[in-house]
Image (cartoon, rainbow, N blue to C red):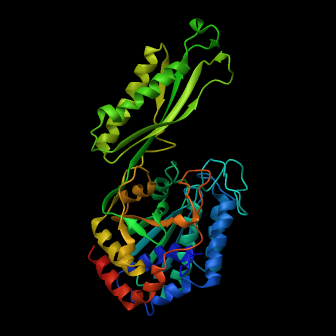
Amino acid sequence: MAAGALPLPLLLCAPAFLLLAASCGAALDDPASLLRRAKDAEFMDWMVGVRRRIHENPELGYEEFATSELVRRELDAMGIPYRHPFAVTGVVATVGTGGPPFVALPADMDALAMQESVEWEHKSKVPGKMHGCGHDAHVAMLLGSAKILHEHRDELQGTVVLVFQPAEEGGGGAKKMIEDGAVENIEVMFGIHVLDTVPIGVLASKPGPVMAGCGFFEAVISGKGGHAALPHHTIDPILAASSVIASLQQLVSREADPLDSQVVTVGKFQGGGAFNVIPDSVIIGGTFRSFSRESFDRLKQRIEEVIVAQASVQRCSSVVDFLDNDMPFTPPVINNPELHDFFLKVGGEMVGPGDVRDKQPMMGAEDFSMYAEAVPRTYYYFVGMLNETRGPQAPHHNPYFTVNEDAISAVWRRHASSVGSSLSARAAAACCRC
């Protein structure tokens, strides 16, 4: 651990401070005590332990039964009331008065269908499944926030709603949580994500668009199978699929405005199982991203046109599915400008103004954006965990991805005393302007 640094769990408690400050009118007796509590060794060990237990037992979207049980068990131990289930495995807990204003923070619980390659004591025990995006840390940080918030529940003038949701990774979990009534009466919601490209101890975001809208597609390209030595007796779907993929790459490079960020990626290709057999069909699939609905709809139209046309050139037929039921469209994440001002004020007092930074928009997607359809004001920000002294940090969705548990910026230690009584007064004023 770097000299003068603080453990990651303190940074994981960032939502608690934002939520406490966001409870308009709250007047904490001793806000600096939150930081002291978060530095408590027993508290930090507990949070890390929660994260590691979840990491060892990853579960895919809508299958997070053990994770949901863990969450409910921890909430029961704290004495925090909750409702369950929402969207199969979701949990919604509340801390505070039970009355308005209602401020919420979600945490996604699902893992990825990938094999972990990191060899360590708490490696995934489930073959082919891994927490490769930090959702295990998100659940731990929200439970940590719950504990601190509950300890200060009598000082809250309003209600903090803690939303543990399933199936963020393409399953539309947020949408199903909304449909099940998980965010009724919520006025403000803060989303959070650990990020491997932001320096440790830094909070980063921006007003307006911060993450892209996202859709998925899958296509079955059918031909006529046969012996690989007699291709003239076949209609080769692998050749057709290859032509399709090459043509799809031109949608962005040749048809999109260079200043309008878009992505089309084919990440799935399934066809054939023998060296000397041309298969009857091939399945391809991928994702497409943009920051505007207009660009998104145009990409969607052109993806289908290109697949059908290019398959036809090679004498194949094709069926395109945009998976609207299983993997619904995720809108872009667009941050409320007034909440950005609030984020700068509160974040600056937590970590220092120099460690609250602008974040360039990214083509990654996040179903937190769906909450904006039901919640008047939403804001999404990133918690940095990059420490270059530890060597290269594997990116999200990589089998070598790790969550940095070692240290955070020493700035928080220097600025702990600055939080004080001014945190609630300033942040409450900023929030109540919204």
* Residue 213 seen in render: yes
Q: Nearer the viewer, residue 367 or 94?
A: 367
Instruction: List the single residue furthest toward the bottom.
Output: 29
Q: Position of residue 175 (x, y in %)?
A: 46, 53
Compared across the picture, whether 382 is left or right of 37 comes to: left
Please, is residue 188 above or below residue 217 in the view? below
Q: Residue 186 falls in which quadrant of the image?
A: bottom left
The residue drawn where x is 46% and y is 81% is: 412
Q: Residue 354 falls in which quadrant of the image?
A: bottom left
Which quarter shows the C terminus?
A: bottom left
Q: Residue 394 falls in which quadrant of the image?
A: bottom right
Q: Position of residue 391 (x, y in %)?
A: 57, 61
The residue drawn where x is 45% and y is 85% is: 414
Compared across the picture, whether 379 is left or right of 149 comes to: left
Which quarter shows the N terminus?
A: bottom right
* Residue 101 seen in render: no
Please, is residue 423 above or below residue 233 in the view? below
Q: Nearer the viewer, residue 286 or 254?
A: 254
Q: Position of residue 6 (x, y in %)?
A: 54, 79
Q: Position of residue 47 (x, y in %)?
A: 62, 74
Please, is residue 20 above or below residue 68 in the view? below
